[in-house]
Image (tube, rainbow, N blue to C red):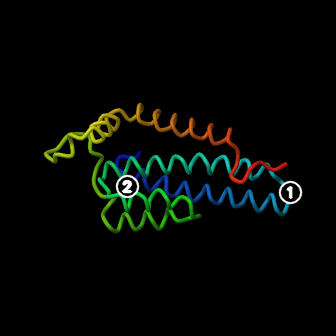
Amino acid sequence: MFHTPKSLFRALAIAEAVSWTLLIGGLILRATQDWALAVTIGGAIHGFVFLAYGATSILVAVNQRWSPGPTLVAVVSAVVPYTTIPVEKWLERSGRLDGPWRLEAGEDPREKRPLDRLVRWSLNRPWVLGALIAGSVIALYVVLLILGPPGGRDH
């Protein structure tokens, strides 16, 4: 399904935009229909997808060997509604999403770095990688839920 970094990144960029729609729709329903549950549902989905997009951006950035600039742009694009899609298009046009997953060590000396070895190891075990990313996103999500929403809780 996600045989390339491009296909995974594109799917999460679109999912992040859709999750913004759910959150904004929830905010509108709360304001117009006094339906606070809509924000809870939209916010929960958006929060989870937001974190998954950030993790995916970092994974793809390491695999594709992006410099810090494009990596930061990709991660931060999730903060502004619907920005992940034009960023994905920019990364595609600039060739930063081209190429396969790096599953084997090549001649490049960077292949020997611990981070590259870890990424290669995890990419060769997609179920383990998926479980690690999902577990990390869920753990961070739970911590953020415990801390509460930005600006404090409504009383």
The percent position of residue 124, horizontal first and vertical second, equals: 31, 35
> How many labels, in total?
2
Asked whether 140 or 19 is in front, the reply is 140
Which residue is label 1 attached to? 34
Q: Residue at x 77, y 48 (%)?
A: 153
Say if 76 sits above or below 154 in the image.
Answer: below
Q: Secondary structure at mark 1?
A: loop
Q: CA distance from mark 1 to mark 2?
A: 40 Å
Q: Nearer the viewer, mark 1 or mark 2?
A: 1
Q: Residue at x 54, y 54 (%)?
A: 15
Say if 91 sits above or below 144 in the image.
Answer: below
Q: Residue at x 36, y 52 (%)?
A: 61
Residue 147: name its quadrant: top right
Q: Residue at x 42, y 66 (%)?
A: 89
Left or right, residue 36 beside residue 89: right
Left or right, residue 148 beside residue 130: right
The percent position of residue 7, horizontal first and vertical second, equals: 40, 53
Circle nearer the N terminus (1, 2): 2
Kindly identify the amino acid type of the residue bearing the numbered disc 2: Lys
Is disc 1 in contact with disc 2, using a CB cutoff of under 8 Å? no
Say if 88 sits above or below 48 in the image.
Answer: below
Left or right, residue 16 beside residue 125: right
The percent position of residue 47, horizontal first and vertical second, equals: 61, 49
Q: Secondary structure at mark 2?
A: helix
The percent position of residue 138, horizontal first and vertical second, equals: 57, 37
Which residue is label 2 attached to? 6
Could you classify mark 2 by the number of other residues whose Cα lies within 10 Å: few (under 14), some (14-19), or many (20 or more)?
Answer: many
Could you classify mark 1 by the number of other residues whose Cα lies within 10 Å: few (under 14), some (14-19), or many (20 or more)?
Answer: few
